[in-house]
Amino acid sequence: MRVELKGLQKRFGKVLALRGVTIDLPEGSRTALIGPNGSGKSTLVRVLMGMLCADGMVLFDGVEASEERRELARRIAYVPQIAPRLAAPVGDVVRAVAGLRGQAWTEVAAIAAALSLDLDALARRPFRALSGGQRQKILAALALSSGAELLLLDEPTASMDPRSRGEFFRLVESLPSSVTVLLCSHRLDEIRRLVDRVIVLAEGELRWQGSAAAYLDDHAEAVVEVQVVGEPADTWLLARGFTRGATGWWSKALPVNERARLLGEIGRNLNGQVRDVMARDVERLQPDSQGERE
């Protein structure tokens, strides 16, 4: 599904939550929507869902959303940042949502099991009695098993444990290439392998959109951290610009495209002297003007 937003504007009283946002999500694209709290990410997703009205145009496959909302509901799946506290039993919630799409219980239960959740065991419990992570896993299982053409994922793993978070991202990664995914997150480093495009919002404005590779080149750097044994290893790291922290970890920040080279050098030169090594990407700066690079 292709999604186009043209001059999208949304006001809540005196607060302008979206300021003329124009975005194009090609069919099959995997896009990270990033920005600080209050940037307009959740508002934009709710407009796409039809939960909020806004000025401007929203088109799905070239058709204005207002003309096809009932049909669109079957083609879109959504996972909110915070799962609602519904009073109904888990079984009723799952059967009601899955039934609207013609999904079988077993299809949802299989995805839930991959996320370390036994859906059958929870079927009679009130949905609101579950932990935040359990509720989130059920909503994720419903979305990932839905066969939807557009997945809107608003901080979907915020309440999940690390293992389930990793499995969720693996499941997203394995979706058919025709599925369009918009994934909201505060942490681009966590989702960078899943996306090919990046959109940045700040104070309701579009500050950046383009390829993920171009964004990382412009706005991110890698941090390599390593623990070693022995003075020769310490000397080697110091000579290459690493800084030692109070807990014994050595760290160095460098451009993302130089990370693999440095890790290779560590492996070749400090073989047998490395206790642990980690590499992560961090945002170097907040973009301050609208732009695009492909």
Image (spheres, helix red, strand yellow):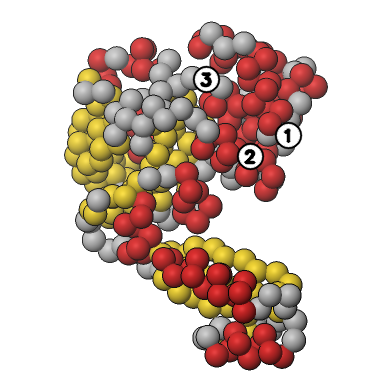
Depth order, front residue of 37/14: 37
Work out whether mark 3 precedes mark 1 in sequence or the reverse, and give the earlier one.
1
- Structural crowding at the residue carrying mark 2, measured as other residues with C-alpha within 10 Å and reported as few (<14), some (14–19) or many (≥20): some
- The CA distance from mark 3 to mark 1 is 19 Å
Q: Say whether residue 155 is left or right of residue 164.
A: left
| Kind of residue sitting beneath label 2 | Glu
Task: Give the answer, above or below, for where 58 lies relative to 289.
Answer: above
Give the secondary structure at mark 1.
loop
- Which numbered tag is attached to residue 82? none
Looking at numbered disc 1 in the image, what kind of residue is underneath it? Ser
Disc 2 to disc 3, C-alpha distance: 17 Å
User: Dot 1 corresponds to which residue?
Assistant: 116
Does residue 128 show up?
no
Mark identifier at residue 167: 2
* Residue 210 position within the rendered picture, expressed as x and y whole percent measured from the top left: 28, 50
Please determine whether, in this image, residue 275 is positioned above or below residue 288: below
Residue bearing the label numbered 3: 146
Residue 220 visible: yes
Element assignment for label 2? helix
Query: Percent x, y for residue 75?
Result: 41, 19
